[in-house]
Amino acid sequence: MLAIGSMALLLAACSSNTNEVANHIPKNAVAVVAVNAGKMLAKLEADGMSVEQMLGAMKAVKANEISEVMDKWKQLKDAGIDWEKPFFLAAVTDTAVANDPTGIVMLASIKDVAKLAAAVKQQTGKEAEKRNGLFVTSYQGSTMAWNDEMVVATMGDKANPAAQIFFDLKAKESVTANKHFNEALQKQADVMIYTSGTSLNNPEAAMALAMVPKAKALAEDIETASWINFEDGKAVMQNETYVGEALGKLLDKYAGPQIDASLIERFGGGNLNTVAAFSFKPELVPAIVEELGVAPLANMSLAQENLTVEEIGKVFKGDFAIMVSDFAIPEKEMGKDGSQPKYDEPKANMIMVARIGDRAIFDKLMAKASEKGLVKMEGNKIVVAEPDADMKDIVIGVEGDLLVISNNAATYASYAAGGKNALKEDLKRTITGQSTAIYVDLQSILNKIPEPMVAEDAPAMAMLAEARKVLQTTSLTLSNYKDGKLSGSGELTMTAGKNGLSHIATLVIAAANAAEKQDASKDTAKAQ
């Protein structure tokens, strides 16, 4: 069933806005995934690729398993499932899998019930039972049930007769009763992923939330919807997060700040590999503490240090950035007996910076830390009183209104000197207008991995060579709260001229082909 489910994802389609099968997904589903595999397969075929080609290449890695999946794939292509309609995977609680708090359920429309029955019999080796108007069969810890219109497969540790629940589901009990789910499903995407706050209702979460008076009220009604599309030379994701009224009011009240690019422009540490930056109004922190109803308790604890929650919220202005540059894996001399690794641990220069808000409160905190013997001040430098081995190269200091931390004295000095360095256009575009952003220059990292380091691992070498040709950058962003939601995006950029999905498939095929050649070479050597 798992193999069938995995390959069925490649056949799924979400081209219709009327999704009868979705009406049978319970409202308490923790997550729902829909894949427009028809569209995705067309993109692969446009670049001269096919599922059979990919499976054939991967057969070298796990021949028996892939051969079995290949057979199931051929069966699925004509197994009576209506692949022109949506196929769904849903993670549900308490209804899908016996003795398991969360189970995976697959749902699909049927085109030819006779073909489905024949395919299931061929797979399981037995006839399905007729039960309450449904055909039901169990196989390897899973249960499949169907009528003339729909098939449901539940997966878990034990065969589960609860599939009947999905067929009997009332409209008001369905996830389609949720406005945000329906909106998410209507947007065209190769992959749609929806999550709800249902997990907050499980016993573990309920116990944790019970410890904070208003935590559940603040966290409930959180939903996310993500859409992933594969385009020419890239994979693009859009995301929307919806929150409840209480949290929404707080986010709306304190929305506004955007990433301070000057924190990044000031970094003169060489080639940037990674940047992570975010900005927010620090007043949001004490506001959330107040909303949670724990401000009195927090203030009671802080009072011992002559501090308040409100003061803590003023320590920093709300602008933060982390930058990593000059990534390398240096070669080192091997020991006389050749036992030492040829390459050292990966190295890079790093800067973490935060803009100080209220300097008087910041100095007050530093004074408290000094009194307790945690740190000592040496001019503008903050020295950890008893540094461990991991802290020996760390430099911490205050430069104007910035708290600066670096793993390298020269990198710290360069940043402290100030200046303004031009940012690459794609990095600049990523951070502009966002409240949070992460950017990774994949090429700058991949090109610093020594080929001899992976030369003996043919699949890894093939993947590295292909990745260097294909992968460029990746990024994630999040904007300020607006119109009742937080909007985010992500992008993996690749070489133009071929669809991003085809590029990813090519990486897998390259590794599989290399593995086949490596295994063939080993077999030849053994034979000789």
Image: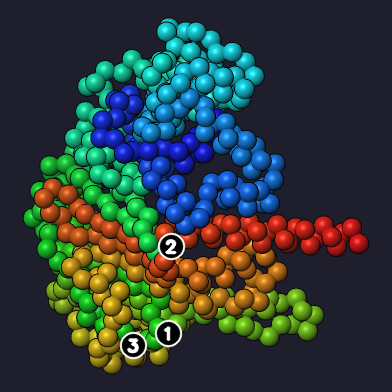
- Describe the element under mark 3 as helix, strand or loop: loop
Q: Quadrant of residue 403?
A: bottom left
Q: Quadrant of residue 420?
A: bottom left
- Outermost residue on the left side: it is 253
User: In this view of the protein, which residue sits in the foreground, 455 or 397?
Assistant: 455
Q: What residue does disc 1 label?
A: 408
In this rendering, position of residue 335 left or right of residue 496? right
Q: Could you tell me if residue 53 is visible in this image?
A: yes
- Three-letter code for the amino acid on which mark 1 is drawn: Asn
Tell me where residue 325 appears, x and y as whole percent.
Answer: 41, 80
In this rendering, position of residue 337 left or right of residue 444? right
- Three-letter code for the amino acid on which mark 2 is drawn: Lys
Q: Are the residues at dot 1 and dot 3 in contact (C-beta closer than 8 Å)? A: no
Which of discs 1 and 3 lies nearer the camera? The answer is 3
N-terminal label among 1 and 3:
3
User: In this view of the protein, which residue sits in the foreground, 5 or 204?
Assistant: 5
Q: What residue does disc 3 label?
A: 268
Q: Quadrant of residue 319?
A: bottom left
Which of discs 1 and 2 lies nearer the camera? The answer is 2
Q: Which mark is residue 386?
A: none
Q: What residue does disc 2 label?
A: 498
Residue at x-position 47% and y-position 8%: 131
N-terminal label among 1 and 2:
1
Q: Are the residues at dot 1 and dot 2 in contact (C-beta closer than 8 Å)? A: no
